[in-house]
Image: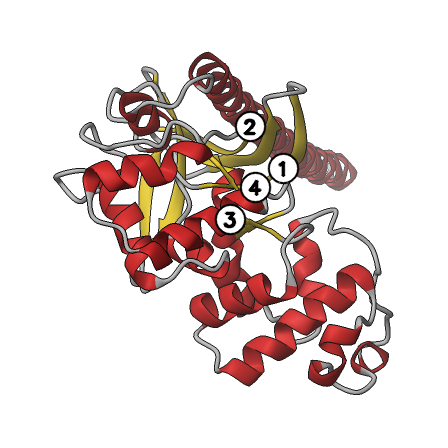
């Protein structure tokens, strides 16, 4: 009788142990399955977000290709400050926005706009002269003359090596201290700016809205901001007249009442029909035309597309530069 009870007790203990083991295995398998489901769900969600952001890029390229041929006030507003909703894809549970940020006139804040940015509004670091880079760095970064000269010299040294005009402004063995030599070649990406002697992440973020490496070096006078026009050599009075002409009666850029220059050779004539120009101001604009530094249309565009699900905080961003002449992307970054 005792042996029978012992046997039953042993069977019960074994059954409980087996049940516990099975329960443990079930919980473990459940956790693993849940982790895999969450992983696949996350990957699927990220894939869908990328698809949304990519759709925004394609939409932007389509709109650029359809509207860039001739620049008029409505097209300028549409491309750079869209109010029609064309640069938004608003679905039932998702939203794609194609937008960019640009510094305010006082450089103290940023303003967001729907649309794209033409790269030719910026100063091309591969084509700009020492004095142009110096002036841009001075005005945008708020540096004193000597500091601006030093950084501009470092840009030229990175691009071309040591030139006679910059020797006096270079720090001794600057790149030797940084453990790498200057490239002595054209900028291939804007991220190379961070390798230039004297540049920091903060200075980079402040300078980047005003510089490019795309295009032929000519600056679009219809869209260029004050610091870029100043870097080209235009003085304050004539720049203000250019900006006032562009902005129209409401004094706002990229709005319906804007004026546009129809060709670089028309700038003086159109300005004179708008306001009075001194001979000195005429000479400043003429000098830029003679040196082929101005244009009135753009071919390279920065696109930023953000895809988002409305019930989630996850965002996928694609930033790219589109060459509308050769119909190809020159830069692509996913965030």
Calculate the distance from the C-alpha at mark 2 to the C-alpha at mark 3: 20 Å
Read off the residue under disc 4.
218
Up-down: is 66 above or below 161? Answer: above
Read off the residue under disc 1.
215
Element marked by disc 3: helix
Are circles 1 and 2 on residues that touch, CB within 8 Å? Answer: yes
Read off the residue under disc 3.
288
Residue 143, position as x, y percentages in the image: 48, 78
Calculate the distance from the C-alpha at mark 1 to the C-alpha at mark 3: 17 Å
Which is more toward the observer, 133 or 25?
133
Residue 223, position as x, y percentages in the image: 39, 40
- Residue 110, located in which quarter of the rendered image? bottom left
Name the residue located 74 percent from the left edge and 37 percent from the top edge: 14
Name the quarter where the N terminus is drawn: top right
Name the quarter where the C terminus is drawn: top right
Going by the picture, which residue comes out furthest to the bottom? 172
Instruction: Using the rendered image of the protein, determine whether residue 32 is visible from the camera's viewpoint.
Output: no
């Amino acid at each position: 009788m005792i042996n029978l009870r012992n046997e039953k007790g042993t069977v019960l203990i074994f059954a409980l142990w087996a049940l516990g083991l099975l329960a443990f295995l079930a919980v473990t398998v459940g956790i693993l399955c849940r982790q895999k489901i969450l992983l696949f769900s996350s990957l699927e969600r990220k894939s869908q977000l990328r698809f949304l952001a990519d759709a925004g890029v394609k939409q932007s390229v389509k709109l650029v290709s359809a509207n860039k041929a001739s620049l008029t006030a409505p097209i300028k507003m549409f491309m750079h400050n869209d109010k029609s909703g064309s640069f938004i894809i608003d679905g039932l549970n998702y939203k794609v926005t194609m937008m960019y940020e640009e510094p305010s006139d006082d450089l103290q804040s940023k303003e967001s706009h729907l649309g794209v940015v033409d790269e030719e509004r910026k100063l091309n670091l591969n084509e700009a002269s020492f004095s142009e880079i110096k002036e841009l760095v001075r005005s945008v970064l708020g540096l004193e003359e000597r500091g601006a000269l030093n950084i501009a010299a470092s840009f030229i040294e990175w691009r071309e090596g040591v030139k006679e005009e910059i020797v006096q402004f270079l720090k001794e063995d600057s790149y030797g201290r940084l453990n790498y030599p200057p490239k002595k070649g054209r900028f291939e990406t804007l991220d190379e700016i961070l390798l230039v002697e004297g540049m920091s992440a903060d200075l980079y973020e402040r300078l980047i809205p005003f510089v490019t490496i795309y295009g032929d070096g000519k600056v679009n006078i219809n869209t260029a901001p004050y610091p870029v026009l100043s870097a080209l050599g235009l003085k304050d009075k004539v720049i203000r007249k250019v900006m006032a002409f562009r902005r129209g009666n409401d004094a706002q850029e990229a709005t319906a009442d804007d004026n546009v220059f129809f060709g670089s050779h028309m700038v003086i004539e159109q300005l004179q029909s708008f306001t009075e120009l001194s001979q000195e101001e005429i000479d400043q604009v003429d000098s830029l035309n003679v040196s082929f530094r101005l244009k009135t249309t753009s071919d390279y565009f920065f696109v930023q597309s953000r895809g988002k699900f409305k019930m989630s905080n996850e965002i996928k961003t694609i930033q790219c530069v589109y060459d509308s002449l050769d119909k190809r992307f020159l830069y692509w970054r996913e965030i």
